[in-house]
Image (cartoon, grey):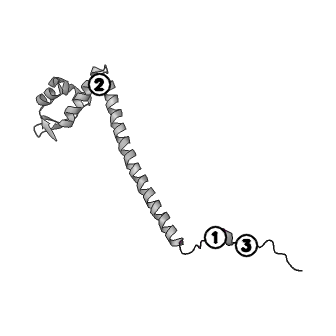
Amino acid sequence: MALFMISVAAELAGMHPQTLRLYERRGLLRPQRTAKNTRRYSQHDVERLQRIQELTELGLNLAGVERVLAMEMQMSAMAAEVQRLQALLEAAAADMQREIERVERSHRFELVPVNHTQIVPLGRRRRRT
């Protein structure tokens, strides 16, 4: 939800409002616009500005910042996909376990336990001719 005007967002991020405009032109930031075309920044936008500032302070230029932010978004999407697949795997394992238990219950009455000491080997039978 966009709450802040450009001056407030710039102050929260510790930047000049012109820097925010530059970042918007470069595509690093996309603030919402009001009906009168005034920029409105959300808390997420301010956090993104702070992340951009961290990266530039590390020595990255804006092209590098763009690349890092794109990779971070990709990693986040991949992590969400891994969680989704993990949940599917756990559900499939639970389904398989339930099916194994169902099959074992259905065979319970068909199988008769035999004590191996009671089995007498008969040997080979010979055919009479």
Which of 28/13 is in front? 13
* The label number, if any, that marks residue 115 in the structure image: 1
Q: Secondary structure at mark 3?
A: loop
Q: Secondary structure at mark 1?
A: loop
Residue 32 in the figure: left or right of residue 62:
left
Q: CA distance from mark 1 to mark 3?
A: 11 Å
Q: Is residue 102 above or below residue 63?
A: below
Which of 37/66 is in front? 66
| Residue depicted at x 11% and y 33% | 5
Mark closer to the chain start, 3 or 2: 2
Mark closer to the chain start, 2 or 1: 2
Q: Secondary structure at mark 2?
A: helix
Q: Name the quadrant containing residue 73.
A: top left
Name the amino acid type tagged 3: Val
Crowdedness of circle 3 by 10 Å Cα count: few (<14), some, many (20+)? Answer: few
Give the magenta range: 108-116
Q: Main secondary structure of the magenta part?
A: loop
Q: Quadrant of the N terminus?
A: top left
* The label number, if any, that marks residue 120 in the structure image: 3
| Residue depicted at x 51% and y 67% | 104
* The label number, if any, that marks residue 55 in the structure image: 2
Crowdedness of circle 2 by 10 Å Cα count: few (<14), some, many (20+)? Answer: some
Q: Position of residue 98 (x, y in %)?
A: 45, 63
Mark closer to the chain start, 1 or 3: 1
Name the amino acid type tagged 2: Leu
Name the amino acid type tagged 1: Asn
